[in-house]
Image (tube, coloured by chain):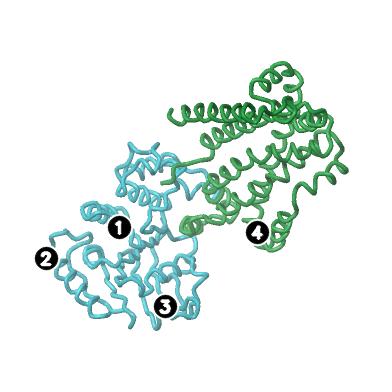
Chain colours: A cyan, B green
């Protein structure tokens, strides 16, 4: 992995002449977790799509990119849906990126990342044989396998049950340590647990919120994180 | 097992109705022969029927194979290229407006009375269902998969090969299942229009000589052939193409 850059985005976006966001100004700190918290429909996924280079359908005016040059080839993406290919085994799914780039996947590395997410014994299984939490761990292993300095997370834990979600948050925070992570989420608890930096995105723009002081990932019982979570929720409820 | 028993029961019922019509209507055997006579003819003419069935079967199999390959490649080409879609799809739809029957004499003129005019008929009749069901499936690829692949740095060609085609194989399979039933129709039409061999030829010949029992025997063999072909295709699709969608 090369050194993690910081990211920036300033501008406005439209899709089919409908404004998605205006006057956005966002900085994503190098090597840390930045949480972009917002309700559905405020355009936070559009921000992510633009950074990922998947924004052909978006009319964007402004500028975005990495502090040290082009972003292309330095990004890994993890979404709400695990996006595992059902016809491939777990280890083939993990090695998908290499196969898609016509490279030879390194089996030792595949085994290593699967061990890291605790799924060594499931390497030969098909995704359909796994639980939702296990599947999302495979998606995390696939993200790790890509070994990119920037990781974009689009509500990757929102389809999981509360217990699985909290464990998955801890695991993800641990294995992605040192990378520039932009987490898009609608869950105040998630932002309070995981954000080194927390931004609330509303239709009026982006607001900074002081994050809790404890190290990431914060304990589910951390009183300060719980207070921040409550104030984040209150902030979200102020808008319609 | 229930389905299997129901099939046998249904066959018996069909034969019973057939026999009842013959008895009640007191029909002469050159209008409607009874099941007994047809089975007898089937046994007596087994060599002739078998030889001709073999011809029809090879026409159908070659047509099915070529149609599957050509249809599959066309679908991939259309899915890969918007230019090809714009140019070729209207043509494909137009070609479907031409009754295949009308093409048979032309094909016989071009390709002769032998095997290849029938292969061409079978091919033409299955080409559209194969192409269209595979193409539709190729165009329905989960766009999030494609997005993920692009972030991973995949080219359009590799996305096609590693994601869109494998994801669309069940669609290809439904096209093939249809094709297995349609292909014999094409071959028989071809044989009707001009042939000296094959089940279609045999039926026409038997009909002309008022050997309706032989015609029915050939028809039954053709139906059984088609059912076996469909069952074999279905097995092939289950084994290699279908998938439990996760």
Measured as percent of width and height from the top left, residue A185 is found at: 31, 66
Viewer-closest of B12 and B242 = B12
Q: Is residue B118 left or right of residue A90?
A: right
Q: Pointer 2: what residue?
A: A223
Bin the neighbour count of mark 4 within 10 Å (Cα to Cα): few under 14, some 14-19, many 20 and up: few
Q: Pointer 3: what residue?
A: A20
Q: Are marks 1 and 4 on the same chain?
A: no
Question: Is residue A121 placed above or below B92 in the rendered structure?
Answer: above
In the rendered structure, which disc, 3 or 1, sits on the residue that comes first in sequence? Answer: 3
Q: Residue at x 36, y 40 (%)?
A: A129
Answer whether labels 3 and 4 touch (C-beta < 8 Å). Answer: no
- Whole-angstrom CA distance, mark 3 to mark 1, is 24 Å
- Whole-angstrom CA distance, mark 2 to mark 3, is 35 Å
Q: Is residue A160 left or right of residue B110?
A: left
Q: Chain of mark 3?
A: A
For the N terminus of chain B, which image quadrant?
top left
Answer whether labels 3 and 1 touch (C-beta < 8 Å). Answer: no
- Whole-angstrom CA distance, mark 3 to mark 4, is 31 Å
Q: Chain of mark 1?
A: A
Q: Quadrant of residue A196?
A: bottom left
Q: Chain of mark 2?
A: A
**Secondary structure found at label 4:** loop
Q: Pointer 4: what residue?
A: B81
Q: Is residue B53 visible from the viewing direction of this image?
A: no
**Secondary structure found at label 3:** strand
- Whole-angstrom CA distance, mark 1 to mark 2, is 22 Å
Q: Which mark is residue A157?
A: 1
């Amino acid at each position: 992995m090369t050194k993690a850059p910081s990211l920036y985005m300033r501008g406005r976006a439209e899709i089919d002449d409908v404004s998605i966001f205006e006057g956005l100004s966002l900085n994503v700190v190098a090597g840390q977790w930045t949480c972009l918290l917002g309700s559905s429909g405020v355009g936070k996924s559009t921000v992510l799509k633009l950074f990922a280079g998947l924004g052909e359908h978006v009319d964007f005016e402004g500028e975005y990119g990495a502090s040290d040059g082009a972003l292309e080839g330095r990004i890994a993406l993890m979404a709400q849906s695990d996006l595992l290919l059902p016809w491939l085994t777990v280890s083939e799914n993990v090695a998908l990126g290499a196969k898609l780039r016509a490279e030879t996947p390194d089996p030792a590395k595949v085994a290593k990342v699967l061990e890291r997410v605790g799924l060594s014994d499931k390497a030969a299984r098909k995704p359909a044989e796994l639980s939702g939490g296990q599947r999302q761990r495979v998606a995390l292993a696939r993200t790790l396998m890509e070994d990119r300095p920037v990781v974009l997370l689009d509500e990757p834990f929102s389809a999981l049950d509360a217990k699985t979600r909290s464990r998955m948050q801890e695991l993800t925070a641990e294995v992605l340590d040192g990378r520039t992570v932009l987490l898009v989420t609608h869950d105040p608890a998630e932002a309070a647990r995981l954000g080194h930096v927390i931004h609330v995105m509303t239709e009026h723009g982006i607001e900074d919120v002081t994050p809790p002081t404890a190290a990431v990932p914060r304990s589910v019982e951390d009183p300060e994180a719980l207070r921040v979570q409550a104030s984040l929720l209150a902030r979200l409820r102020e808008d319609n | 097992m229930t389905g299997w028993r129901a099939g046998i029961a249904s066959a018996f019922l069909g034969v019973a109705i057939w026999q009842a019509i013959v008895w009640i209507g007191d029909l002469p055997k050159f209008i409607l022969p009874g099941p007994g006579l047809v089975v007898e003819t089937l046994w007596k003419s087994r060599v002739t029927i078998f030889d001709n069935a073999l011809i029809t079967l090879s026409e159908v199999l070659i047509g099915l194979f070529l149609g599957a390959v050509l249809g599959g490649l066309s679908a991939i080409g259309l899915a890969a290229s918007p230019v090809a879609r714009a140019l070729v799809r209207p043509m494909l739809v137009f070609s479907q407006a031409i009754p295949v029957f009308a093409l048979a004499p032309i094909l016989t003129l071009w390709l002769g009375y032998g095997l290849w005019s029938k292969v061409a008929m079978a091919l033409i009749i299955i080409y559209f269902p194969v192409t269209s069901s595979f193409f539709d499936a190729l165009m329905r690829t989960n766009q999030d998969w494609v997005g993920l692949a692009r972030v991973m740095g995949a080219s359009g060609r590799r996305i096609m090969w590693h994601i869109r085609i494998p994801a669309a194989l069940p669609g290809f399979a439904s096209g093939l299942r249809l094709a297995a039933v349609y292909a014999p129709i094409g071959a028989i039409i071809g044989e009707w229009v001009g042939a000296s061999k094959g089940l279609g030829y045999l039926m026409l010949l038997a009909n002309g000589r008022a050997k309706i029992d032989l015609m029915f025997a050939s028809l039954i063999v053709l139906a059984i052939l088609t059912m076996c072909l469909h069952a074999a295709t279905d097995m092939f699709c289950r084994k290699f193409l279908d998938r439990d969608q996760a």
